[in-house]
Image (spheres, grey):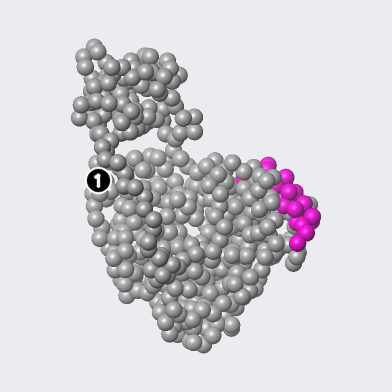
Amino acid sequence: MAISVETFFLNPDAQGTLQAQIQEMIAAGILSGRFRAGEKLPSSRKLAAHLGVSRITVTLAYTELVANDYLMARGRSGFFVSETAPVPPSFAPTERRQERVDWNRTITRTFTGGDTPRKPKDWRSYRYPFIYGQADASLFDHANWRLCALRALGQKDFAAMTGDYFDQDDPLLIEYIARHTLPRRGIIARPEEILITLGAQNALWTVVQLLLQPGRKAAIEDPSYYTLRDQLSHTGSALDVIGVDRDGLPPEQIAADTDVVFTTPSHQSPTTATMPMARRKALLDRARDIDAIVVEDDYEFEMSFRTQPSPALKSIDSDGRVIYLGSFSKSLFPGLRLGYLVGSEPFIRQARALRANVLRHPPGHIQRTVAYFLSLGHYDAQIRRTAKVLQERRAVLEEAMATHGLTPADRNLYGGSSLWMQAPDHVDMGHLGDGLRDKGVLIEPGAPFFARETRRHNFYRLGYSSIAADRIPQGIAHVADAIRTFRP
């Protein structure tokens, strides 16, 4: 029995090559039970004509399916569903029953996931996406990333891809971070003082788990990274929320009984304020006086396109009390989920043990791919290219804001990929942002960045890493008009 060619169609929104789509379409038919063992597939010529693809594409798809035992070839007769192809389950799914577990009572802790609205999955379809931290496909070096990934998949790197590092990391990636990345921030570290993490968020979680417990106190900036605040709320430790000014975290406001200080000195999150050198030294002096640990999140230091960034806190730390966080997820793409921790060897040793208990280590293939992308110079080239484009977009953004009377909450000198903005006091940027979506505009309300007791609703963040420069003026015009006409 032959399967009708009309059964097959390609999804115009599907991902992957045409050959891969055809393979997936046929495999799905077999696994769902629609195509049965012994049934004949349409000829490659007929299926190619029906789908509007080349005959060789269909032939290659059929050949790959034969190799995977989904199909079998019979001389000049064509291709058939293999007698030993995977078969769908013959049992009926268990009937869904009424839940009898009281999960509100059973779950011992509840998490907000960051207490922030989620970015829409289709954000790329918006004409004016002023959102932070998303990758611009036009700026990414797809070709060289693909080559690095393929190289990492090769036989030479088979052990790096498939091996269990247990509590260790890819030595090539660690070597690059130690010899190239950290020295640019003035930091000298041995491999034993570096740990790869699943992004900066995982790095923060690791620090929180190791350093805080009931009876201890943490100090954080306000506004600050909302996920950190959520993590700290589950430690049982006291939390001191310190308002930032135009220079970042004021050291003199850190209480004497503070054990751990979390700070973002290069680009304060989210205000983008840059901490001057005098204050950095004052912060370290204060930490030394009260014997506190300082956790430095040095995100976006690569995006300092207006002037050279100030030295990292870690680079001027003579006591070993600074724990440094870096992330490739910010500078490459957020889905990468790869960052690193740098600290004194006793701390990193415990961080390594904790990571091994939870997730062993980040995937070896990802680590090796990034190591190649860095060591072959592609990363530096991308950073230079991205910084140039961001500088151009920043100029367009500032001109558009001046034209339409929008007010930044402050101005940083170094660059970055976003601006922290302030609307009049009566404007609720959360409600306003919902309305702007109808005009294709995405902004990030600022309220979730503030602690609940200090929450402000008239702040918002404008990211410019994912919006083309020629769309910025009209997008800003929409934002300005919405603010001007807002009624509570």
Magenta-colored span: 467-488
Locate residue 91: give its quadrant: top left
Q: Quadrant of residue 30?
A: top left
Q: Is residue 69 visible?
A: yes
Q: Amino acid at mark 1?
A: Phe
What residue lies at 37% left-to-right and 18% top-to-bottom?
Answer: 4
Q: Is residue 486 magenta?
A: yes
From the viewer's perspective, tell me whether residue 445 is left or right of residue 205: right
Q: Residue at x 21, y 17 (%)?
A: 74
Q: Position of residue 177 (x, y in %)?
A: 39, 59
Image quarter where the N terminus lies is: top left
- The residue shown at (46%, 30%) is 11
The residue tagged 1 is: 158
Residue 378 sits above or below residue 78 on the image: below
> Left of 346 or right of it: where is 272?
right
In which quadrant will I find the C terminus? bottom right
Is residue 76 highlighted in magenta?
no
